[in-house]
Image (tube, grey):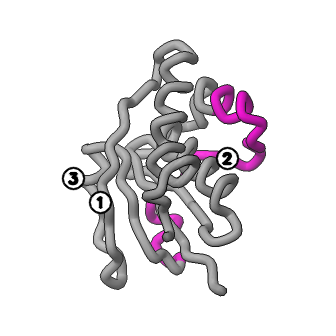
Amino acid sequence: MNKKTVLILCTGNSCRSQMAEALVNHDLGANVRAISAGTKPQPKVADGAIAALQDLGIDTQGLHPKDVDAVMNEPIDLVITVCDNAKEACPVFPRAIPSLHMPFHDPHGEPLESFLKVRDEIRGKTGGGSRHAVGS
């Protein structure tokens, strides 16, 4: 079976999309390959996002913000926008790609508890305990 590739798109690619990428790859990696990017990427992944993922024992090595242009030629099967700004600024891909909008609160600059709450909401909607799993 070929893995489906899901692009998780956000504005800064430093919080929500990074957590979603890591969670999907961890929880659904046998069937789905997640990548993430931003329309205006930040210089680094937010410390709270890293801490929230490490709290679950998820490897955060290699996570770094990427510009959406860097993934334009990937074989993407689905685009998921996790913030309203990314939905509005979603680029036009070289071919038609189905998209899904799943907005989450932006915990950037907030205490770790906010990151943990958003992490758990993302996990619930992407397949870590949900019957509405991405890629199913």
Residue extending farthest left? 88
User: On the image, which quarter does residue 96 sit in?
Assistant: bottom left
Q: Residue at x 49, y 46 (%)?
A: 17
Judging by the rendered image, the residue that carries numbered circle 1 is 90
Q: Which span is picked out in magenta?
A: 50-74
Residue extending farthest top? 111
Residue type, mark 2 in image = Leu
Q: How far separated are the C-alphas under marks 1 and 2?
A: 21 Å
Residue type, mark 1 in image = Cys
The crowding category of the residue bearing disc 3, from other C-alpha atoms within 10 Å (few below 14, some 14 to 19, many at least 20), is few
Q: Residue at x 47, y 15 (%)?
A: 110
> Is 48 drawn above or below residue 58 in the view shown?
above
Residue type, mark 3 in image = Glu
What secondary structure is found at the residue carrying circle 1? Answer: loop
> Is 69 drawn above or below residue 126 in the view shown?
below
In the image, residue 59 lies in the stretch drawn in magenta:
yes
What secondary structure is found at the residue carrying circle 2? Answer: loop
Q: Are marks 1 and 3 in contact (CB under 8 Å)?
A: yes
Residue 88, which numbered label? 3
> Viewed as shown, does residue 82 lie left or right of 50?
left
Q: Are marks 1 and 2 in contact (CB under 8 Å)?
A: no
Badge count: 3
> Is 58 drawn above or below residue 91 in the view shown?
above
User: On the image, which quarter does residue 56 sit in?
Assistant: top right
The crowding category of the residue bearing disc 2, from other C-alpha atoms within 10 Å (few below 14, some 14 to 19, many at least 20), is some
Instruction: Identify the mark nearer the N-term, 3 or 2.
Output: 2
What secondary structure is found at the residue carrying circle 3? Answer: helix
